[in-house]
Amino acid sequence: MQNFDYQTPTRLIFGKGVIEKLPEVMAQFGKKILLTYGGGSIKKIGLYQQVHELLKDFEIIELSGIQPNPKYDPSVLDGVRLCKEHKIDVILSVGGGSVLDCSKAIAAGACYDGDTWDLISYKVKAQAALPIVDIITLAATGSEYDCGGVISRTETNDKIGYMDRHLFPHTSFLDPTYTFTVSKKQTAAGIADAMNHTIEQYFAEDTTLLNDGFCESMLRSLMVNGRKCLDNPEDYTARAEMMLACSYGCNGILALGNSYSGWPCHGIEHALSAYYDITHGEGLAIITPRWMRHILNEHTLPRFVKYGINVFGIDASLEPMEIANKAIDATYAFFESIHIPMHLREVGIDDSRLDEMAHHIAVNEGLDQAYAPLTEADIKAILVDSL
Ligand code: NZQ
Ligand code: ZN
């Protein structure tokens, strides 16, 4: 087991109706709030109105229109400008992972005198950030329980995972009823995203019985409950378990003591959504089984065997290579069964920029250091298989 130094300071307030505690939580930071949200889903579900009602004694400045795969320009830049102009005390993010990620970058930029991109691109280390409170309305990224935000810069095709310990939300409100209205497409993408977060940490060196069991249970829970959410979007118990599972996905708790895996599918997917603005979870579902097939060899075989037996219940008496191949087939079949498009062409990506993307990934994502190291040629082969 590797040494580690771990802390998650975020307070999670979970369950039906917990939003009642919002005024009390916000009051500890001051009166001036930057309320951030996306394209309008929070108005449709009545949450926007509820937040204003609860916070009528506060001064609220708004930043709306934050898009999926949130953009540096205009959203992050506008948010930083508003925070500085209005001397904002705290950011309240209401929406999915994109709104929260954008809010995290704004929180850091608001406390920095230079260009916010210096921070996101790791040229300069943040010394402080505004406090962030969030109400998460989509179960997927785990951004509500981690210190990362993923920001896209369109003109350079960059999509950067910006992590800094100042970016942990102070408090995250998780009410599963807010996720009842999430579309089937976004629910399925959320399942795939959280499953891949788990897979990225399961396929590593130095894993433990403890972490493996946690990951295997995460995967089984996400498949069982995810399917229930799709069949009955208002199944509270299933939405609640899926929401909690998603929160565990990215904050490191699944991999304490493991060697770093390199998160290869995310490295590849971030380029896909940077170049083509596709839905993150769909890109991951397409890449994951192709990446698995590509890295399957004598060294990685025991991991695949364990995954196949404990996650999919594959017969342990079969030959190891057969178990591994069945496990990869089962991964693909599950994503297909929840109606995720399983080819890049189906999400608008053809072969015209594969070389460029493979090069971009090889240069920027450090996948030569991953659990199963990937060269530029390996990345290209995975992309070609995914077409
Ligand atoms: O914009 P609005 O109108 O709010 O609609 C959103 C958006 O169109 C909608 N939505 C959200 N809550 C809803 C709802 N629709 C109906 N009812 C609700 N309750 O769903 C659409 C997608 O929202 P988005 O926030 O983009 O989805 P998600 O939460 O999956 O976030 C994806 C982003 O997170 C990044 C991804 O790369 C992507 O940019 N990631 C962030 C991570 C992190 N911070 O740790 C880790 C992940 O690996 C991931 O990379
Ligand atoms: Zn992800």
Image (cartoon, rainbow, N blue to C red):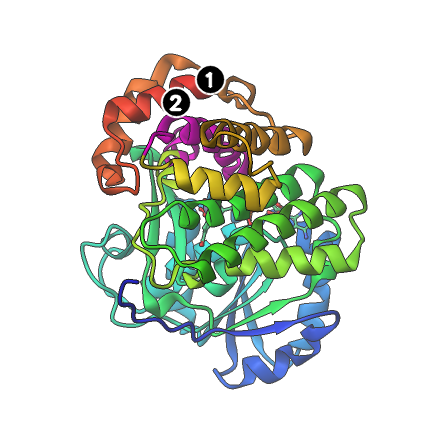
Task: Decide if ligand 1 comes within 8 Å of the CB at mark 1.
Answer: no
Name the main secondary structure of what is drawn in magenta: helix
Answer whether residue 296 is visible to the viewer in this image.
yes
Instruction: Measure how far apart labels 1 and 2 are at the Cα level.
Output: 7 Å
Place of residue 285 in the rendered image (x, y in percent of width and height, measured from the top left): 53, 34
**Is 129 on the left or on the right of 246, as rendered?**
left
Place of residue 77 in the rendered image (x, y in percent of width and height, measured from the top left): 37, 53
Q: Tell me, yes or no, whether the highlighted magenta stretch contains residue 251.
A: no
Residue at screen point 78% across, 59% down:
236
Residue at screen point 56% across, 20% down:
346
Answer whether residue 37 is visible to the viewer in this image.
no
Q: Amino acid at mark 1?
A: Leu
**Is 56 on the left or on the right of 228, as rendered?**
left
Classify the position of the N terminus by image quarter: bottom left
**Is 82 on the left or on the right of 49, as rendered?**
left
Q: Amino acid at mark 2?
A: Leu
Q: Nearer the viewer, residue 248 or 62?
A: 248
Q: Tell me, yes or no, whether the highlighted magenta stretch contains residue 287.
A: yes
Q: Nearer the viewer, residue 79 or 159?
A: 159
Quadrant of residue 37 in the image?
A: bottom right
Quadrant of residue 189 in the image?
A: top right
Query: Mark 2: few, some, or many residues within 10 Å (few <14, many ≥20)?
Result: many
Q: Nearer the viewer, residue 76 or 260?
A: 260
Residue highlighted by disc 2: 383
Identify the secondary structure beneath mark 1. loop
Identify the secondary structure beneath mark 2. helix
Q: Residue furthest left?
A: 123
Residue highlighted by disc 1: 387
Residues drawn in magenta = 269-298
Place of residue 21 in the rendered image (x, y in percent of width and height, measured from the top left): 66, 80
Is there a contact, CB below 8 Å, between mark 1 and mark 2? yes
